[in-house]
Amino acid sequence: MKWIKFLMASYASLFLFSSSLMAVGVKNDPVEKKIDKLISRMTLEEKIGQMNQISSFESIETMGEFVKKGSIGSIINEIDPIKINTLQRIAVEESRLGIPLLIGRDVIHGFKTIFPIPLGQAATFDPELVKIGAHIAAVEASSVGIKWTFAPMVDIARDPRWGRIAEGCGEDPYLTSVMAIAMVEGFQGNGSNDPTCIAACPKHFVGYGAAEGGRDYNSTFLPERLLRNVYLPPFEASVKAGAYTFMTSFNDNDGVPSSGNEFILKQVLRKEWGFDGFVVSDWASVREMISHGFAADDKEAAMKAVNAGVNMEMVSMTYFNHLKELIKEGKVKQETIDDAVRNILRIKFRLGLFENPFVELNKPSVMYSETHLEAARRAATESVILLKNDNQTLPLDENIKTIAVIGPMADAPYEQMGTWVFDGDKAFTITPLNALKEKYGNKINIIFEPALAYSRDKNTDGIAKAVKASEQADAVLVFVGEESILSGEAHCLADLNLQGAQSELIEAVAKTGKPVITVVMAGRPLTITKEAALSSAVLYSFHPGTMGGPAIVDLLFGEEVPSGKTPVTFPKTVGQIPVYYAHNSSGRPANGEETLIDDIPLEAGQTSLGNRSFYLDAGSEPLYPFGYGLSYTTFEYGNIKISSSELKKNDILKLSFDLKNTGKYAGTEVAQLYIQDKVGSVTRPVKELKRFTRVTLQPGEKRTVNFELPVEELAFWNIDMKKVVEPGDFNLWVGGNSCDGKEISFKVIE
Ligand code: GLC
């Protein structure tokens, strides 16, 4: 653990030093002069070439010809360092102007060493560790010549039917913003003199996670105020963190596909936020504006995209094929092209590609180093959420004699890595079964009965053997969840119950009367209402990556204590979706007095059930709220004090509270601060997360924790579409999740 602290400290100081240099440098930045000079020498074809990204294909000769002519600015999906060096040599030595290529790849949660999926990393509520994970991914990816990742994905997602909820940081703008900054800084390191830095690419700009029905690529209908208050903040945070590139999203919002949306790409991103990197389309999203019915053909799609502010086109080649004639016809201005190329060249300079685009071939591999694997294990450990632990079922006693290990996810090395893994090798994955055998195999009898071959397996023939194994065991561990293919892009579900015969398996094992410990590995919250009720304990792991096995086993036996918190609300049933904590009140909020379906008397009167916002058959509460997670110990919050109960807009709300470990295990609590703006010029969420911190305490230890919250952070986009702090009454809560905490009131005054 000490080495992680050292890594964090040295890393933070390096970043601070270099960013101050960057700030000073901006005023006298010679790069702009170099860019001007280069642009003045470029032909129109060469400029359009910089705006063209192709996906690598077999023939290096053919690609080389394109590169030599200056027809390609970037190549995606090439990871062979020898091929990359060959292509870079052609670009630098054989093309007319020697402009290097930018090699991109989806390095979403690790390159070779796979970290938990981003939703799992968000569950750590540990941005420092997330930054280290991103840096490790950059170190491994850059070692083969990759200098650009299409991450972080910072789409707010409040619908777990959407498979890409796995790739983001959940439902909350503040948590996602904090994680976005961590990942951008982790990927981009301390700038171009760091060969291990790679360009980040916050995506998908914007609103993609609100796809109607949770169905990928589907339309979104987000009004500007909701965009600005919920979906844009993580992207703005990414710009402030210095992100080099942005990627547009597939969705059309209110009828306008993002790759043709001038409002978000120019008004917001450039004018309001001052973004000076470049914007790339998503895969063929320029051409897909034809399918949207927003462009008649490739030529119109190219015109709409480039005029809206998409600087580089990913793989659909409409720029390459049509921009020249669009310029000639006066439908696209020359300055639009020059601006796009300027942005692209700026990032290539910033990445140091003009100084050295080549990757050093003869150096020891950095893949899967002990340091990397340890960081991945730490991230996996902190990402696991303890959702239930009746009668202190967990941690397991090391002296137990026999453990039954059941279920299709106990030994699934490929599935455990999760979605968006192109380069991770399952051979390096340590599964829970492997880890259990490795650590306890010599003293505990481990009976492994998967019962099902994979998560969707409907064949129940193997359940009997699992039941038999359970009857012989002192502890029953059931590993269920999702194969990795069931989440991620285009992998949406209309039903979030456990797939296949997994639920029957848990029911059958529970019938033995043995305490069932259910461990879920999935890419999203699943509606495990029934299975959780049948289990004595539930650990939830959003696909934990290469080191998920040791992490889970150390948690099961108390070598580690769970600290993960839900980054997204868990619905009881899919019918509750969308369900999230930061919802508006409505005029008739549920108050817990509603009559649920099984309690409705016969011939009940029309108004007898409580005219409130709830479901007769599911109530109003989720299965697990946002920010929720148990520990093996307990924590007590007390002595909450605020600096003043009346604050002005330029004040800082200073809050302190005592946090005490009232149990018998050392543990880490994620203390959370929520704020409510009680009355606004528009309706406001009932709660919003504004601060969180991880606090590790020994049994009995008490510590005073401090939060500082500038009142200006209470600003929101109001009825006049202005971002302001409106004076009035506020509430705050400090607690271990979005439901707990003592309510404290304060006022903001003029
Ligand atoms: C995909 C994804 C995007 C990814 C890109 C390149 O369709 O939407 O997130 O970065 O194409 O693979």
Image (spheres, grey):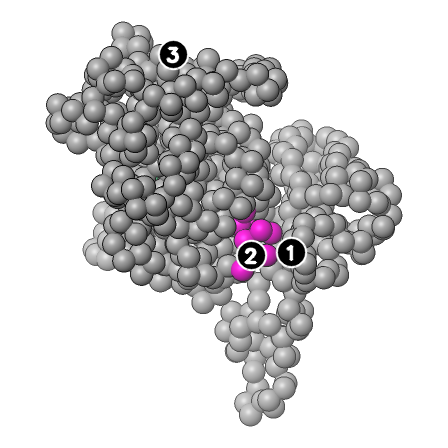
Q: Residue at position x 53%, y 29% from top?
A: 242
**From this viewpoint, is residue 205 visible?**
yes
Q: Viewer-proximal residue, 247 or 567?
A: 247
Q: Residue at position x 67%, y 40% from top?
A: 691
**Label 3 sits on what residue type?**
Glu
- Mark 1–mark 2 contact, CB under 8 Å? yes
Q: Residue at position x 67%, y 29% from top?
A: 698
Q: Which residue lies under the disc numbered 3?
A: 355
> Can you say whether 7 is above or below 475 in the image?
above
Name the spot of residue 215 as percent of width and height, x first.
36, 59
> Can you say whether 715 is above or below 131 in the image?
below
Q: How many marks?
A: 3
**Label 2 sits on what residue type?**
Glu
Q: Earlier in the sequence, mark 1 or mark 2?
A: 2
- Mark 3–mark 2 contact, CB under 8 Å? no
Secondary-structure class at tag 3: loop
- For mark 3, does the 10 Å Cα neighbourhood hold few (<14), some (14 to 19), or many (20 or more) residues? few
Q: Which residue lies under the disc numbered 1?
A: 721
Q: Residue at position x 32%, y 30% from top?
A: 47
Residue range in magenta is: 223-232
Does the beta carbon of the residue at mark 1 sit less than 8 Å from ligand 1? no
Secondary-structure class at tag 2: helix
Name the spot of residue 439 as percent of width and height, x first.
39, 26
